[in-house]
C-alpha cells in the first residue's frame, strides 16, 4: 500500500490484520470498486452475482474472503472453478501469495497434469481446491474427491465456462455440494443463461455491478486502424518495431498466432513469444512467466489461451483481427490499463470486418476513433462513417531498424497524399542474425 489512506480502506472492508499485512507487503493500492462492494458481502456469508471484467481486481473478491473463512480450519472447505487451466493457475498463484503464509493450503486441479500427481497433492489435505470443471469431474468419477463438506463455492468467469460447454459439469459439481454452501458467481456479462444458472444454484444472491456491464476501462486509449488484408502484416510489424512497451497481439486462430510469431522473428524481434493450444501446458506456462518477468516484450495469443493472461503493466493490446463477439473484445483490451495504469488498444479492421466493428461499438455505446493505413482502399460496399475518416498518416523510419525496410523499395503515396517508405519485407535482411 502506498498511503495510510490505502491501508484504512482495506481495513474498512473487514479483513483481518494478518491478511492486511500481506496486502500491504504486496503493495496493493486502495481497493477497486468491485472489491469495495463484493468483499464485505462475501465476508458476511451472502451469495453474490457479480458483473466483473478482466482487470477489475475480481480475484481478490473471492480469494480474500475465502482465506478469512479457512483460517484455523482443518479439511477442504473451499472450491474455486475456473474456465481454463491458465486462469486456474493465476488464481493458485494469488492463493500462494496470500493464503500459504497464513498456513492455508491450496491445490490446483487442471488438465495437462498427471492424475496421479493430483492424487498425491490431494493427500496433503488442502483447505482450498482450484480447478477446471472437467478435471474436477474426472476426480469425482475416480472417487478422489468428496465435495459434501465444501462451504464456499466460487464460479470465476461463469459466462466463459458456459461458452466452453461446461454446463453439464457445473450441474454435476454443484449437485455434489451441500445446498447450505455460500456461492459466489463472477461473470463479465449477465446474460439470460447466467441468470438461469444463478437462479438454480444460488440462494437470494446480492447483486454487485460496478458501472455499466461490458463497459471498457476508461484508462485504455482505443483506436481502430483501417487496413486492407494485404497490408496487415506489414502494418503490424511496423507498429511492433515502433512500440517500446510490452505488447499482447490477439488473433482468432492458433495457426495464425504461430505464423505471426515466426514473422516477428523474421523481422528481428527476438523478444517475442506465443501461447496457443498447440503448445504444451508447461511451454505455455514458461512463455507466460517469461512475458511476466520481462524476458519477452511481445506476446502473441489466441482468445482461449489469452484468458489466462494476468500480467500487470501491459502497455499495448493489438487486435490483429477482430473477435467474433463484442464480449471477447472487452476481455482482450482488459489486459492493459489495469489497476489504475494507462494503456493502449489498437484494432486492425479490414473492410470485411466493418460489421463486426459496428457490433462492438453498439455494445460499447460509443464510436472508436479510427485512422487509415497509408494506401488503404475501402470497397464501396463497406463504406460508412469510417470510409471518410482520417485519410492516413505519414511514417518515419523504423526506430533503429534501417536495414529492415529496403532502401531500394519505391516510395508509395498514400491516399491522403502523404508519403511513406517501402512497404515490403526485405527478404534476407529481415532474417539476418536470427540464429534459429
Image (tube, helix red, strand yellow):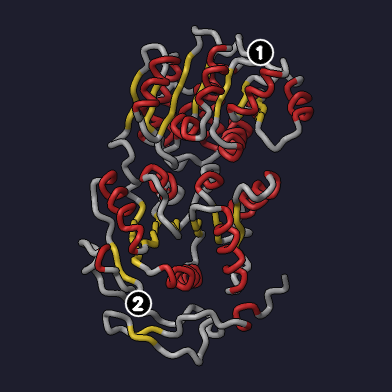
Q: Which image quadrant: the C terminus?
A: bottom right
Q: Nearer the viewer, residue 280 or 298?
A: 280
Q: Look at the image and tell me whether residue 87 can be seen.
A: yes
Q: Mark 1, residues whose alpha carbon is within 10 Å: few (<14), some, or many (≥20)?
A: few
Mark 2 vs 1, N-terminal side: 1
C-alpha span from label 2 to label 1 = 61 Å
Quarter-wise, where is residue 90 in the image?
A: top right
- Up the image or down, 163 lies above or below 204; here it is below
Image point 55% across, 42% down: which residue? 308
Q: Label 2, secondary structure: give it.
A: loop
Mark 1 sits on what residue?
A: 146
Give percent across and percent down for residue 341: 41, 51
- Up the image or down, 427 lies above or below 209; here it is below
Mark 2 sits on what residue?
A: 374
Indicate left or right for 406 with 284 as reference. Answer: left
Image point 44% across, 42% down: which residue? 55
Amino acid at each position: 500500500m502506498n498511503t495510510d489512506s490505502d491501508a484504512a480502506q482495506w481495513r474498512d472492508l473487514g479483513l483481518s490484520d494478518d491478511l492486511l499485512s500481506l496486502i500491504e507487503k504486496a503493495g496493493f493500492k486502495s481497493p477497486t470498486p468491485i472489491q469495495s462492494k463484493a468483499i464485505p458481502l462475501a465476508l458476511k456469508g451472502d451469495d453474490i452475482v457479480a458483473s466483473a471484467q478482466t482487470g477489475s481486481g475480481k480475484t481478490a473478491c473471492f480469494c480474500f474472503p475465502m482465506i478469512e473463512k479457512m483460517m484455523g480450519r482443518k479439511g477442504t472447505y473451499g472450491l474455486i472453478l475456473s474456465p481454463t487451466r491458465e486462469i486456474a493457475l493465476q488464481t493458485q498463484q494469488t492463493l500462494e501469495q496470500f493464503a500459504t503464509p497464513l498456513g492455508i493450503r491450496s491445490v490446483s486441479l487442471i488438465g495437462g497434469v498427471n492424475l496421479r500427481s493430483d492424487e498425491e497433492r490431494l493427500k496433503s489435505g488442502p483447505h482450498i481446491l482450484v480447478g477446471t470443471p472437467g478435471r474436477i469431474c474426472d476426480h469425482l468419477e475416480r472417487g478422489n474427491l468428496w465435495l459434501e463438506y465444501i462451504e464456499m463455492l466460487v464460479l470465476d468467469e461463469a459466462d466463459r465456462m458456459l461458452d466452453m460447454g461446461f454446463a453439464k459439469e457445473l450441474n454435476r459439481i454443484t449437485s455434489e455440494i451441500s445446498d447450505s454452501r455460500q456461492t459466489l458467481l463472477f461473470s463479465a456479462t449477465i446474460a439470460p443463461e447466467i441468470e438461469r444458472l444463478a437462479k438454480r444454484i444460488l440462494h437470494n444472491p446480492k447483486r454487485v455491478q460496478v458501472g455499466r456491464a461490458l463497459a471498457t476501462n476508461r484508462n485504455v486509449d482505443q483506436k481502430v486502424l483501417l487496413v486492407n488484408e494485404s497490408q496487415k502484416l506489414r502494418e503490424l510489424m511496423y507498429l511492433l518495431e515502433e512500440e517500446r512497451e510490452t505488447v499482447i497481439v490477439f488473433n482468432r486462430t492458433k495457426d495464425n498466432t504461430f505464423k505471426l510469431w515466426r514473422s516477428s522473428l523474421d523481422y528481428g524481434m527476438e523478444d517475442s513469444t506465443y501461447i496457443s493450444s498447440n503448445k504444451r501446458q508447461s511451454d505455455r506456462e514458461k512463455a507466460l512467466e517469461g512475458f511476466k518477468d520481462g524476458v519477452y516484450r511481445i506476446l502473441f495469443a489466441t482468445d482461449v489461451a489469452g484468458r489466462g493472461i494476468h500480467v500487470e503493466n501491459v502497455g499495448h493490446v493489438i487486435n490483429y483481427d477482430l473477435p467474433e463477439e463484442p464480449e471477447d473484445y472487452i476481455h482482450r483490451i482488459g489486459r492493459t490499463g489495469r489497476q489504475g495504469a494507462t494503456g493502449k488498444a489498437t484494432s486492425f479492421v479490414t473492410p470485411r470486418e466493418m460489421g463486426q466493428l459496428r457490433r462492438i461499438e453498439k455494445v460499447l455505446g460509443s464510436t472508436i476513433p479510427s485512422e487509415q493505413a497509408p494506401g488503404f482502399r475501402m470497397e464501396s460496399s463497406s463504406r460508412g462513417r469510417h470510409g471518410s475518416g482520417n485519410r492516413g498518416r505519414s511514417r518515419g523510419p523504423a526506430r533503429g531498424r534501417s536495414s529492415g525496410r529496403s532502401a531500394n523499395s519505391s516510395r508509395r503515396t498514400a491516399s491522403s497524399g502523404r508519403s511513406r517508405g517501402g512497404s515490403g519485407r526485405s527478404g534476407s535482411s529481415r532474417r539476418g542474425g536470427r540464429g534459429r
